[in-house]
Amino acid sequence: MDDSRRLPTSAGAALRKLLPPPALCGFLLLLALLFTVSYAVGAGSGPVAPGMHDPGTASDGDDGDGDGTTHGGGGGGGHGG
C-alpha cells in the first residue's frame, strides 16, 4: 500500500533537481519548432521587395554602388578616401 509513496533515492532526487520541469522542456521545444517553421517559410518566400539582395552580392552586373557600372578586379572600384 505504501509502495506508491516511496521516498526517492538520493541519485533519483539529485537527477530530478538538475532537470528542468517538463512544462519548460515542452515550451522550449514548441518555441524551437515555431522558429524553424517561420524561418523556412521566410526563406521560401524570398525577398519582400523587388531587387532586394544581400549587401555583399551584386546582381545584373551592377556592383551595388548605384552608378550602373561594374568595376573589375579586386581593387575596390576607386571608392575610399
Image: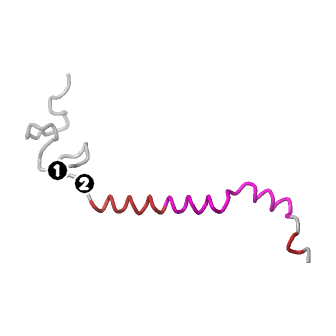
Q: How is the image coloured?
A: secondary structure
- Image check: 68 left or right of 32? left
Question: Which numbered tag is attached to residue 47?
Answer: 2
Could you tell me residue 7's position as x and y percent?
88, 65
Q: Which amino acid is tagged 2?
A: Pro
Neighbour tally class for label 2: few under 14, some 14-19, many 20 plus, Cα within 10 Å: few
Relative to 11, say whether 6 is above or below.
below
Could you tell me residue 14's position as x and y percent?
79, 56
Could you tell me residue 70's position as x and y percent?
10, 41
Identify the magenta region: 8-32
Mark-to-mark CA distance, 1 and 2 = 8 Å
Picture quarter with the C terminus: top left
Which residue position holds label 1?
A: 51
* Residue 77 belongs to magenta span: no
Which one is in front, 3 or 72?
Answer: 3
Question: Which numbered tag is attached to residue 32?
Answer: none
Q: Quadrant of residue 18?
A: bottom right
Q: Residue at x 22, y 46 (%)?
A: 57
Could you tell me residue 75's position as x and y percent?
18, 33
Relative to 26, say whether 51 is above or below.
above
- Going by the picture, which residue comes out furthest to the top? 81
Which one is in front, 72 or 16?
Answer: 16
Q: Which amino acid is tagged 1?
A: Gly
Q: Quadrant of residue 2?
A: bottom right
Q: Residue at x 34, y 62 (%)?
A: 41
- Image check: 8 left or right of 78? right
* Residue 22 belongs to magenta span: yes
SS assignment for the magenta stretch, majority: helix
- Going by the picture, which residue comes out furthest to the right? 1
